[in-house]
Image (tube, helix red, strand yellow):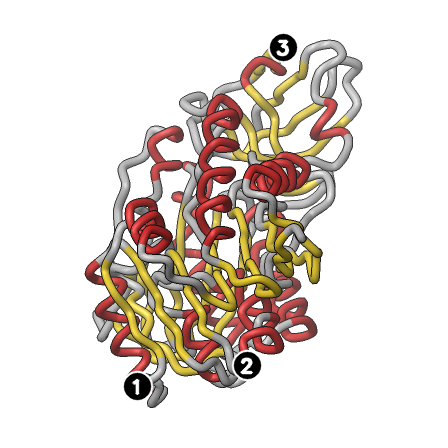
Amino acid sequence: MSLVTLKKDKGHSVKNGGLWIYNNEIENISGRFINGSIVDIEDYDHRYIGKGYINQNSKIRIRLLTRNKDQKIDDDFLKMRIRKAWEYRKKTVDISSCRIIFGEADFLPGFVADKFEDVLSIQSLTLGMEALKLKLTALLKDVLLEDGIKIRGVYERSDAKERTKEGLERIKGFIGESFDTKVKIKENGISYIVDVENGQKTGFFLDQKYNRLSIHSIVKDSDVLDCFTYIGTFALNAGAAGAKSVLGIDASDLAVSLANENAKLNHLEDKVKFEVHDVFDYLPELISAKKSFDVVILDPPAFTKSKNSIKNAMKGYREINREGLKLVRDGGYLVTCTCSHFMDNESFKKAIYQASKSINKRLRQVEFRQQSPDHPILWSADESSYLKFYIFQVVNEK
């Protein structure tokens, strides 16, 4: 096996519990290897660090799999990782639909697996996991079968942009036999049709599961506006929790079509309405028309996916929150979030505060939350902490 030696005074992240080694941290590689294969890693003073897979096409040159020098990266090892991930979900979340594998946070960097009832939606985001994805999928099915859960189909959603950084093509398709990719699931007592083939990411945003539940207490007898509604998840939670009226808006025709289907599925179509609009254009129209709501929900896509665009992202979050706040009635509530790892919590709070101050609105924080426990935050792996979710009461200056 090839041996990678780090530069002097490099590798601070991996030595402190992280799983990534960057290209500029490597002093020497001895022995022959192919990209995607397993290598041993040591520091400059020849202290052993661990085993990981290497890819010279990626700035993240090595992703660590184990710190145990004697550990073989074989089926038993991979099954152990999967079983531990599954046991953790059984203790922490509703497992009817959940994320079973969350990459680095489950010590399988670059691999994601979501369970939607009896269907799996998987992502292979790195070259190392590309070589292991079929084996991991088969082992995952075996682990689930041990608990009597038979998976009827697997769909691969390895169409994320991250793959291009690894020198990989973006692909999607069935692993094994084909099946109807519109899958019915239930979350928080609400039914959804999830499209694992054409939906965003793996088909459904499981990370907001308990955040959706958290709005139930504030929406009763309220008029609610849900922006970036996607397939209607927050909107339908509001309707089911006793909202007087709910309007969900999204720029995607496909998403709104699925949202309307989901409203009918839950017999909420008379109360919860969905319309196709560009949120950034439509909010000013609502403001001009002097519309207002008791609760405004903002769940936008990530405004930044790199450190270089944080300044522009701050502006985007400031503007969207300012427009949302203008639509909240005195004493009403703003629900707002960011799903970007690079938008740290302090910067996000600053953007919200600046938005409120610019229009003389006072904010009282009701709650701060992050992602659902099936997307665990691994301390020392900063990239696993990304979702910030706030509920504020909005009070006019008087």
- Looking at the image, residue 275 lies above or below residue 266: above
Where is residue 126, by image quadrant? top left
Image coordinates for residue 377, horizontal then vertical, percent: 67, 51
Residue occupying the point 51% across, 68% down? 294
Give whichever of 331, 208 is nearer the camera.
Answer: 331
Residue marked by disc 3: 27
Give whichever of 316, 325 is nearer the camera.
Answer: 325
Q: In this view, does 81 lie to the left or right of 264?
A: right
- Looking at the image, residue 232 lies above or below residue 159: below
Residue occupying the point 57% across, 71% down? 215
Where is residue 118, by image quadrant? bottom left
Residue marked by disc 2: 220
Q: Residue furthest bottom?
A: 267
Residue occupying the point 52% across, 41% down? 340
Q: In this view, does 84 lie to the left or right of 309?
A: right
Distance, label 2 to label 3, CA atoms, is 61 Å
Name the amino acid type tagged 3: Glu
Element at label 2: loop
How crowded is the residue under tag 1: few (<14 C-alpha within 10 Å), some, or many (20+)?
A: few
Numbered disc total? 3
Residue occupying the point 33% across, 56% down? 286
Element at label 3: strand
Tell which tag, 2 or 3, sits nearer the viewer. 2
Name the amino acid type tagged 2: Lys
Residue 270, label in figure: 1
How crowded is the residue under tag 2: few (<14 C-alpha within 10 Å), some, or many (20+)?
A: some
Give whichever of 188, 175 is nearer the camera.
Answer: 188
Image coordinates for residue 145, horizontal then vertical, percent: 49, 79
Name the amino acid type tagged 1: Asp
